[in-house]
């Protein structure tokens, strides 16, 4: 299961009904998600349910402005989540939000590239932040076990585009089913 | 070079929290915080000069780079004091163990405390200490501890009424597999 949002719609002061704000709030501006007023924002996608092992990815279009992906955003919207972010002049970072308060868990002394895809995955207690499929930061944390995929910004003016969230392992399971059918098993 | 430390967790709710000292060094790091106690187990990729700066701080416990060396008696005392002050059991720390074994056990117990915190909030309320038996804990606390352990896939059949909280955390932590911090397998 994967869900997407390319934010291609009329300008609006919110991202729309499929998004729930943990803190801050993004707007639709010129077919992108933009932090116009509130720089620090976490929003979760609410129009799908996600397995505990999940991913979130988005195109980083904000240049020097820090932004990225969120996973396991709590469904009660108390402000708990894991986030992975970067910018062209800021290090790749994985952090945890507890009641909307951030704790940095890991970072790599390397900058992000503009227009790159930043992807945060969580599997069990392992978190990994990738840029264009290349691993940049990993860490381990057990605080949160479930929730929804989402997005994060830490600077006013930050912009995101082409978001996708989904479950980890779904594609592999599909492959196994197809292979079993090819082998005549379980048909 | 990856070095390990126990460092304070600093910051505030508005600006955020982070392991002390390492952010200013602008080096790659990976940290695990002790849930509701303000301490981080930290792995940092530092130069010798940066390590000297880190280790010079009196509130930092620096782990030797040779992780497969065994602890000295002095080191046992230092590690025990640091862990117990952060409500992490340390009665099991002894000279026959290597630093890698110590770090693995610490990381595992941190994961349990983190999961507890995520499920139920603060574990060590004012009246709760490591030496309480499980049947002396508030019912909700014991239930939450068991729920946290089960959610991590752990076996709780070894926990009895007379198991102390310190032994429970160690017993549960011992079941968790190795993990990697900044390239070092613990």
Image (cartoon, coloured by chain):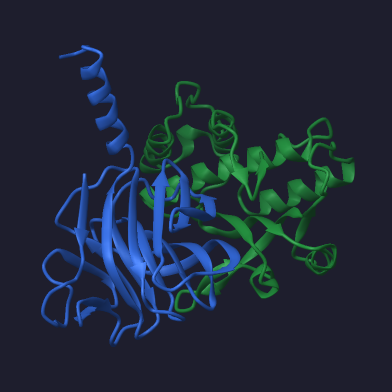
> In the image, is residue A161 above or below residue A76?
below
**What is the x, y in percent for residue A42?**
32, 69
Rendered residue at 82%/30% (across/down): B96
> In the image, is residue A24 above or below residue B138?
below
Q: Quadrant of the N terminus of chain A?
A: top left
**What is the x, y in percent for residue A119?**
39, 57
Rendered residue at 44%/53% (across/down): A133
**What is the x, y in percent for residue A93?**
51, 65
Count of picture labels: 0
Q: Quadrant of residue A17?
A: bottom left
> In the image, is residue B161 above or below residue B18?
above
Q: Seen from this angle, which residue lies furthest bottom?
A: A37
Q: Which chain did the renderer colour blue?
A: A
**What is the x, y in percent for residue A163?**
27, 63
Q: Colour of chain B?
A: green
Q: Is residue B21 visible?
A: yes
> In the image, is residue A87 above or below residue B151?
below
Q: Is residue B91 visible?
A: no
Rendered residue at 54%/78% (across/down): A89
Rendered residue at 38%/41% (across/down): B144
* Near-viewer residue (A155 or B5): A155
Q: Quadrant of the C terminus of chain A?
A: top left
């Amino acid at each position: 299961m994967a869900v997407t949002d390319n934010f291609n719609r009329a300008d609006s002061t919110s991202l729309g009904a499929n998004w729930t704000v943990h803190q801050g709030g993004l707007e639709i501006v010129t077919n992108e998600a933009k932090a116009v007023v509130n720089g620090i924002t976490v929003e979760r996608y609410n129009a799908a349910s996600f397995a505990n092992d999940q991913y979130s990815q988005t195109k980083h279009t904000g240049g020097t402005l820090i932004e990225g992906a969120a996973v396991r955003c709590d469904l009660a919207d108390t402000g708990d989540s894991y986030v992975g972010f970067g910018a062209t002049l800021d290090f790749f970072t994985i952090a945890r939000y507890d009641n909307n308060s951030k704790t940095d868990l890991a970072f790599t002394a390397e900058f992000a590239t503009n227009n790159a895809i930043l992807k945060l995955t969580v599997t069990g207690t392992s978190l990994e932040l990738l840029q264009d499929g290349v691993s940049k930061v990993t860490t381990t944390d057990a605080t949160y076990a479930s929730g929804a995929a989402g997005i994060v910004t830490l600077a006013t003016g930050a912009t995101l585009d082409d978001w996708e969230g989904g479950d980890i392992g779904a594609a592999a399971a599909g492959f196994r089913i197809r292979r079993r059918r090819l082998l005549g098993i379980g048909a | 070079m990856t070095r390990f430390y126990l460092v304070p967790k600093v910051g505030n709710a508005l600006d955020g929290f982070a392991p002390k000292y390492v952010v200013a060094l602008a080096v790659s790091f990976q940290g695990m915080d002790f849930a509701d106690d303000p301490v981080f187990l930290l792995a940092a990729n530092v130069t010798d000069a940066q390590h000297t700066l880190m280790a010079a701080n009196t509130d930092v416990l620096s782990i030797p780079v040779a992780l497969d060396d065994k602890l000295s008696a002095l080191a046992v005392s230092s590690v025990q004091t640091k862990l117990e002050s952060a409500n992490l059991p340390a009665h099991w720390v002894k000279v026959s163990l290597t630093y890698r074994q110590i770090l693995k056990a610490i990381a595992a117990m941190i994961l349990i405390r983190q999961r507890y915190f995520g499920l139920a909030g603060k574990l060590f309320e004012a009246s709760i200490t490591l030496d309480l038996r499980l049947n002396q804990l508030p019912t909700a606390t014991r239930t939450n501890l068991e729920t946290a352990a089960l959610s991590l896939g752990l076996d709780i059949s070894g926990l009895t009424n007379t198991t102390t909280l310190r032994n429970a955390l160690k017993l549960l932590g011992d079941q968790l597999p190795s993990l990697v911090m900044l390239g070092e397998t613990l």
